[in-house]
Image (tube, rainbow, N blue to C red):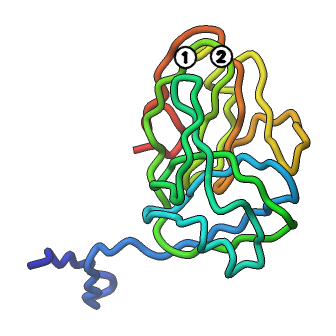
Amino acid sequence: MKKIKGLIIFGLIIFYCGLAHAESVQFKIKNGLNLISNPMDQTLHVSALSQFGCRSYPYFFTMKSSKFKVKRSLAPGEGAYLIAYSDCSVHLKGVLAAMPTQELSPGWTIINGAGIKTDIRFLTNQCNIKASYTLDGWYFNRSTTLTPGKTLMVNVGSACRLAAESYPGGN
């Protein structure tokens, strides 16, 4: 049984069930190697990208402990490399994923953007981030913005932990 909450405005009673409302996220994938993240709260299968005209290698590549892992889907908030054979624009609808807690080791790693857009410069003091880049179709571009659907490659000076409460609007 769901709890029903009510709000009284000028003598009218408006009821709502506390359901999360649907959001939409749009991001571009370029021909070549890309860093993307799953900004939604449901699993993203690589085969689903074809409905947006994306032609890509049939796997995502994630990296753990300096080793690549091949996957066919991304969990909510998870980021990965994707090799695309054409440019396309992905438009996802649903509930945005919460920002995942991420353990960062010194050196190069990726930060997943999940469902909110934020500037990572405020994290520099916490994690000693020395450089940050996007990767769109073989091209590295300096960026400090985490965008839903994208992932940043960062150079971290010392080990640190990024938790949801570290981000603006985090849980």
Residue occupying the point 52% across, 12% down: 159
**Mark 1 secondary-structure assignment:** loop
Q: Amino acid at mark 2?
A: Val
Q: Amino acid at mark 1?
A: Ser
Residue 89 % position (x, y): 78, 71
Of 21 and 55, which appears nearest the observer?
Answer: 55
Of 53 and 100, which appears nearest the observer?
Answer: 53
Specify whether 85 is left or right of 56.
Answer: right
Labelled pair 1, 2 in contact (Cβ < 8 Å): yes
Residue 133 % position (x, y): 80, 33
- The image quadrant of residue 6 is bottom left
Q: Quadrant of the C terminus?
A: top left
Gap between marks 1 and 2 measured at Cα: 7 Å
Q: Quadrant of the N terminus?
A: bottom left
Give the residue at mark 1: 105
- Categorize mark 2 by other alpha carbons within 10 Å: few (<14), some (14-19), many (20+): many
In the figure, 160 relative to 103: above or below? above
Give the residue at mark 2: 156
Of 83 and 171, which appears nearest the observer?
Answer: 83
Residue occupying the point 51% across, 62% down: 40
Residue occupying the point 53% across, 37% down: 167
**Which comes sooner in the sequence, label 1 or label 2?**
1
**Mark 2 secondary-structure assignment:** strand
Q: Residue furthest bottom?
A: 12
